[in-house]
């Protein structure tokens, strides 16, 4: 576990997101399921990291814990220099407001709002002026290729377009961390391709750290780094760009 | 700011319609019930509210206009001595048994003997000067148009009260009473119809004062003298209130009104809160997404409260339009309905209170919003 404990000199290039010996179990009735088992990992900034693994292995749970949506049983999560376990509910909300974006499997768009309004809404709560929120929303939608769809409501958008609005909504906040849970599983191959390309571009042009969970093998080729999970542990850690692949012991 | 609450309300109006209707109809029911009760029981004080007397003088302890006892006629000079009093006139109340020409049996009537002079105070607001003048004829009576059938007479017809012949010389409106039919006569005619030999003077004295705003103070000042036998004084507004309250509680109608108002409030609130809860549940994933993005639960609660407010406001608008039509219709059909500003404000407060209670109940259901459930 030495690898995850940074020396003072290394702090400047410290991983942006780090989990140390995280354990998480769920109890329903008398049955106790250990979902994350002494898991440690560190995510580097400005990359698209893909977490893959079989169904039920704990990928979504890991994402919820790394993003501060769920508490750990034991272990620590450090994100952007804060230890998430020490923040209360309000502080966590503030942390998420300032630093994180989310893209979920479902698009979760308000039926009553136009694409532009969906993206503007969270910005309004960040204390941004009306003009700035509108301007940023426009830019984000243009970036995901929806400049001609500003005024349309979810019922008038295709599935892929809806997911792109959801990405624009997360992106407009200009977060350091972007979490995506199965963002392509409700889409066909072509649309899924577009989405993963957008996420990849975001990581590289904005320097956003993108953490994406998926069991879609087609996405693997687009990631900078792929973590394979099984039974609550990281089994392998591969870097694709460098061609090199290093295995970390569980 | 994106107006999420309003935009959702407009876009998903079908979802919110039941709540708006529930609030609206609950409001309408409260409004009509209040107007009807105030209208019906307001009739018990028509003698006061239909007249321009500012101060009333009567037997101590009188609980409603209809239960007065005669006072000493000499009290009149005591009242006139007060510099604020500009005019005093007697008012005779006689309980009578009406026998009409038609097949109506005996009808219990309240005979009001009033001053027929042109500047008379009694019923000055509901009796035209021409009708008042015709009352000066011996044995002339005026009744409400709507009571003719009940009395079994036509205009110009004759009947008897307490065995004495009277003639209907005119019909008015706004003269209906509660518990009996109001019959207006001159003071002389009323005294002739009075079969109670113990009556030594008028039932009431009604006074006009220079500044009606001082009615309460003048009434207090005129009280207390015992030189002419027992009497007491009220301002017209106080006496009207005493009369209406006596009837409301004597008949149990007051308790009934409160009970019904409570039930209507409750049913409306349940339907409204359930609709709002449904709307929250329908958007729970969207709310959770916003919360994941860092929008606080407090801000999300405000959305629901704002929706509740709009539901209340729209329901209120509907109830007001419909209520106005129904009240006008009721007036045209001689159904007694009254709605003052206080009662109208009470209805508005009730409706908005209902929306607020429903909104809070719906807000409780937002505790289930957990962004972690979006990650599965
Ligand atoms: N709130 C919960 N209560 C009880 N058990 C839970 C809860 N959340 C997750 N689990 C259990 O934890 C395990 C891992 O769940 P998780 O959602 O992390 O899997 P996953 O890797 O995302 O699977 P998939 O690829 O199917 O989405 C599952 O067995 C699930 O039943
Ligand atoms: Mg999952």
Image: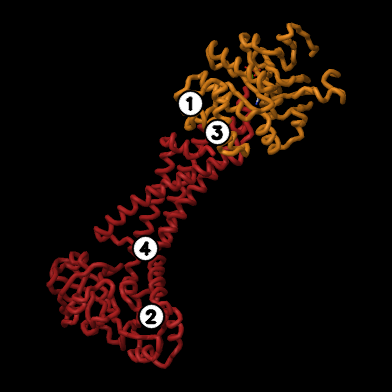
Q: Residues within 10 Å of mark 1 (few under 14, many from 20)?
A: many
Report which residue position mark 3 lands on.
A134
- Which numbered marker is on residue A171? none
Report which residue position mark 2 lands on.
B55
Q: Residue furthest top?
A: A243
Q: Can you say whether B214 is above or below B8 in the image?
A: below
Decide if residue B203 is on the left or right side of residue B225.
left
Asked if the residues shown at circle 2 and circle 4 are in contact, with their CB atoms under 8 angstroms apart, the answer is no
Report which residue position mark 1 lands on.
A154
Q: Nearer the viewer, mark 3 or mark 2?
A: 3
Q: Can you say whether B205 is above or below B33 in the image?
A: below
Report which residue position mark 4 lands on.
B38
Picture quadrant of residue B146:
bottom left
- Residue at horizontal 58%, vertical 23%? A167
Badges 3 and 2, same chain:
no
Q: Provide the secondary structure element on which disc 4 rests.
A: helix
Q: Provide the secondary structure element on which disc 3 rests.
A: helix
Q: Nearer the viewer, mark 4 or mark 1?
A: 1
Q: Nearer the viewer, mark 1 or mark 3?
A: 3
What chain is tagged by disc 4?
A: B
Badges 4 and 1, same chain:
no
Image quarter where the C terminus of chain A lies is top right
């Amino acid at each position: 576990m030495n690898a995850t404990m940074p020396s003072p000199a290394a702090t400047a290039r410290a991983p942006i997101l780090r989990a140390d010996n995280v354990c998480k179990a769920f109890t329903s009735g008398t049955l106790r399921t250990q979902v994350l088992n002494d898991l440690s990992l560190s995510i580097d900034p400005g990359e698209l990291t893909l977490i893959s693994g079989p169904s039920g292995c704990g990928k979504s749970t890991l994402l919820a814990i790394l993003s501060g949506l769920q508490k750990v049983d034991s272990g620590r999560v450090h994100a952007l220099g804060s230890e998430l376990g020490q923040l209360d509910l309000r502080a966590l909300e503030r942390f998420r407001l300032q630093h994180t974006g989310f893209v979920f499997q479902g698009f979760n768009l308000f039926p009553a709002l136009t694409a532009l309004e969906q993206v503007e809404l969270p910005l309004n709560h960040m204390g941004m002026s009306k003009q700035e929120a509108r301007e940023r929303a426009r830019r984000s939608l243009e970036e995901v290729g929806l400049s001609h769809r500003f005024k349309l409501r979810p019922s008038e958008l295709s599935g892929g377009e809806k997911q792109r609005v959801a990405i624009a909504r997360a992106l407009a906040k200009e977060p350091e961390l972007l979490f995506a849970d199965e963002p392509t599983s409700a889409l066909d191959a072509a649309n899924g391709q577009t989405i993963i390309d957008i996420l990849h571009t975001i990581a590289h042009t904005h320097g956003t750290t993108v953490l994406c969970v998926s069991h879609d093998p087609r996405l693997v080729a687009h990631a900078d780094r792929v973590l394979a999970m099984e039974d609550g542990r990281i089994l392998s850690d591969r870097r694709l760009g460098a061609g090199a692949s290093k295995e970390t012991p569980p | 700011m994106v107006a999420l609450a309003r935009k959702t309300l407009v876009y998903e109006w079908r979802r919110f319609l039941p709540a708006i209707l529930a609030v609206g109809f609950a409001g309408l029911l409260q409004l009509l019930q209040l107007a009807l009760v105030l209208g019906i029981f307001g009739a018990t004080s028509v003698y006061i509210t239909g007249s321009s007397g500012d101060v009333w003088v009567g037997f101590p302890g009188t609980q409603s206009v209809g239960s007065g006892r005669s006072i000493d006629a000499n009290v009149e000079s005591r009242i006139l001595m007060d510099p604020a009093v500009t005019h005093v006139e007697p008012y005779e109340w006689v309980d009578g048994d009406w026998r009409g020409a038609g097949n109506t049996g005996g009808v219990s009537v309240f005979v009001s003997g009033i001053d027929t002079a042109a500047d008379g105070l009694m019923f000055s607001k509901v009796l035209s000067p021409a009708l008042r003048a015709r009352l000066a004829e011996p044995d002339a009576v005026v009744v409400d148009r709507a009571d003719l059938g009940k009395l079994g007479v036509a205009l110009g017809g004759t009947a008897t009260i307490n065995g004495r012949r009277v003639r209907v010389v005119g019909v008015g409106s706004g003269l209906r009473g509660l518990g009996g039919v109001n019959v207006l006569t001159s003071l002389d005619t009323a005294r002739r119809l009075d079969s109670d030999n113990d009556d030594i003077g008028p039932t009431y004295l009604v006074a006009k004062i220079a500044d009606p705003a001082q009615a309460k103070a003048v009434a207090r000042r005129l009280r207390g003298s015992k030189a002419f036998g027992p009497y007491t004084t009220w301002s017209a507004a106080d006496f009207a209130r005493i009369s209406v309250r006596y009837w409301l509680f004597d008949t149990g109608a007051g308790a009934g009104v409160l009970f019904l108002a409570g039930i209507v409030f409750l049913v409306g609130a349940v339907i409204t809160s359930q609709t709002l809860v449904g709307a929250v549940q329908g958007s729970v994933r969207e709310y959770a997404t916003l919360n994941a993005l860092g929008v606080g639960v407090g801000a999300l609660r405000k959305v629901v409260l704002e929706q509740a407010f709009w539901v209340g406001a729209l329901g209120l608008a509907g109830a007001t339009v419909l209520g106005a039509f129904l009240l006008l219709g009721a007036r045209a059909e001689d159904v007694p309905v009254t709605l003052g500003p206080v009662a109208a404000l009470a209805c508005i407060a009730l409706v908005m209170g209902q929306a607020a209670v429903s909104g809070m109940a719906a807000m409780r259901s937002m505790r289930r919003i957990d962004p972690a459930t979006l990650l599965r």
